[in-house]
Image (cartoon, rainbow, N blue to C red):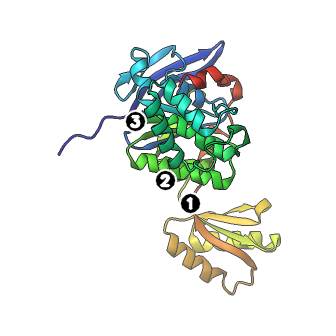
């Protein structure tokens, strides 16, 4: 049996300071080829600094990082030839049309005019921008600008794509279209490192997740693995009358032989369970005929939101000071 492909990204002991602030403090990271790694963390945790360092836009103070086997410090040109980057802020020229933007960036990448025009048409078609191809980007919606920005990041058909909060500010429909595009790229073999503050986005897209805080990874694994760290399944029972909370708490604790917990503000009682169907069936039977007015009940897993808050404590002490605002120059240099 042949050996598996080497990781697309390997980072060990990354350090980066901005003045007195440690943006990266010994960060380790591995992204397997052909997968999506979701990088989660509060503002200022080091997510954007990580992306900028791996994309050769920011020089590390210490540590080693390889992208497709090439050292980001020793071989930056080789790395740049293999990657694409879409930052938090769209870098399109709003005075130009989508077609003109794409041709311009193709030319900056060194393609000749005929190939630039062909590549622009391919990307306009792929990102559903044909109808708006000859309108100035200044009149585009947020979703259209983001799709154009993604198209620019894919001009070179990168083997590794860095997406730094790619759907920030988009409406749900536009966000879903971006998600579909990302999954399509991964299906074609592209490796994606995605930073996001939308926990649903990581849950939908990421094959694995790394939670970063204070410049280092504090937890990693599949979304399901991380969810299991804050507890397994739980049964939730919602009541119509808050006065019934104590009675439901006592009934569930006794019936399921597990300590229940009252969430008064939500008029909800929850209890951890191991066997989903057995617990649900047992609870329904116990509640039926008890005289308690139940609004809803069901078994659910912890969300990534709960994982995130549980691991980071709800925020970073560094807040946003740890990471600089991306500059226009940095985005253009992709």
Point out residue 24 in the picture as x, y percentages from the top left corner. Answer: 56, 23
Point out residue 314 in the picture as x, y percentages from the top left corner. Answer: 68, 40
Specify the label residue 224 is tagged with. Answer: 2
Residue plotted at (26% across, 41% down)? 4
Q: Is residue 212 visible?
A: no
Point out residue 267 in the picture as x, y percentages from the top left corner. Answer: 77, 66
**Image side of residue 279 versus residue 43, left or right:** left
Residue plotted at (54% across, 62% down)? 233
- Dividing the picture into quarters, in which one does residue 289 lie? bottom right
Asked if the residue under mark 2 is in contact with the one under mark 1, i.e. CB atoms within 8 Å, the reply is yes
**Image side of residue 198 versus residue 279, left or right:** right
Q: Is residue 99 above or below residue 54?
A: below
Residue, disc 1: 301
State the separation of the CA atoms marked 3 and 1: 34 Å
Identify the secondary structure beneath mark 1: loop
Point out residue 47 in the picture as x, y percentages from the top left corner. Answer: 58, 31
Q: Nearer the viewer, residue 290 or 58?
A: 58
Identify the secondary structure beneath mark 2: helix
Residue plotted at (56% across, 60% down)? 301
How many discs mark residues in the rendered view? 3
Residue, disc 3: 159
Considering only order in the chain, which callout, 2 or 1, is on the residue closer to the N terminus? 2
Of badges 2 and 3, the one in the foreground is 3
Residue plotted at (54% across, 18% down)? 58
For the residue carrying disc 2, how many other residues have a C-alpha within 10 Å: few (<14), some (14-19), or many (20+)?
some
- Dividing the picture into quarters, in which one does residue 139 lie? top right
Considering only order in the chain, which callout, 3 or 2, is on the residue closer to the N terminus? 3
Q: Is residue 255 above or below residue 73?
A: below
Instruction: Give the residue at the far front of this rendering.
Output: 114
């Amino acid at each position: 049996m042949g050996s598996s492909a080497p990781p697309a990204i390997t980072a060990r002991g990354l350090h980066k300071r901005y003045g007195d602030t440690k943006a990266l403090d010994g960060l380790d990271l591995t992204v397997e080829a052909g997968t999506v790694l979701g990088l989660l963390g509060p503002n200022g945790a080091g997510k954007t600094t990580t992306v900028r360092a791996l994309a050769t836009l920011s020089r590390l103070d210490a540590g080693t990082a390889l992208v497709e086997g090439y050292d980001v410090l020793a071989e930056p040109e080789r790395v740049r030839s293999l990657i694409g980057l879409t930052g938090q802020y769209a870098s399109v020229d709003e005075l130009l049309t989508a077609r003109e933007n794409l041709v311009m960036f193709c030319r900056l990448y060194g393609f000749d005019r005929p190939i630039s025009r062909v590549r622009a048409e391919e990307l306009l078609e792929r990102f559903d921008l044909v109808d708006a191809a000859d309108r100035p980007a200044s009149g585009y919606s947020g979703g259209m600008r983001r799709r154009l920005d993604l198209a620019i990041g894919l001009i070179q058909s990168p083997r590794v794509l860095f997406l730094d909060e790619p759907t920030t500010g988009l409406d749900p429909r536009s966000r879903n279209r971006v998600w579909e595009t990302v999954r399509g790229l991964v299906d074609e073999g592209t490796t994606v490192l995605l930073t996001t503050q939308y926990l649903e986005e990581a849950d939908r897209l990421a094959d694995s997740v790394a939670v970063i805080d204070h410049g280092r990874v504090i937890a990693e694994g599949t979304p399901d693995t991380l969810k299991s760290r804050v507890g397994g399944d739980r049964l939730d029972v919602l009541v119509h009358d808050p006065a019934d909370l104590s009675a439901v708490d006592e009934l569930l604790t006794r019936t399921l032989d597990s300590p229940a917990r009252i969430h008064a503000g939500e008029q909800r009682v929850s209890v951890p369970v191991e066997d989903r169907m057995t617990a649900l069936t047992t609870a329904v039977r116990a509640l039926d005929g008890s005289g308690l007015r139940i609004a809803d009940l069901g078994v659910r897993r912890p969300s990534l939101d709960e994982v995130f808050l549980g691991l980071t404590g709800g925020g970073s002490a560094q807040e946003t000071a740890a990471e600089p605002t991306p500059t226009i120059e940095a985005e253009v240099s992709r």
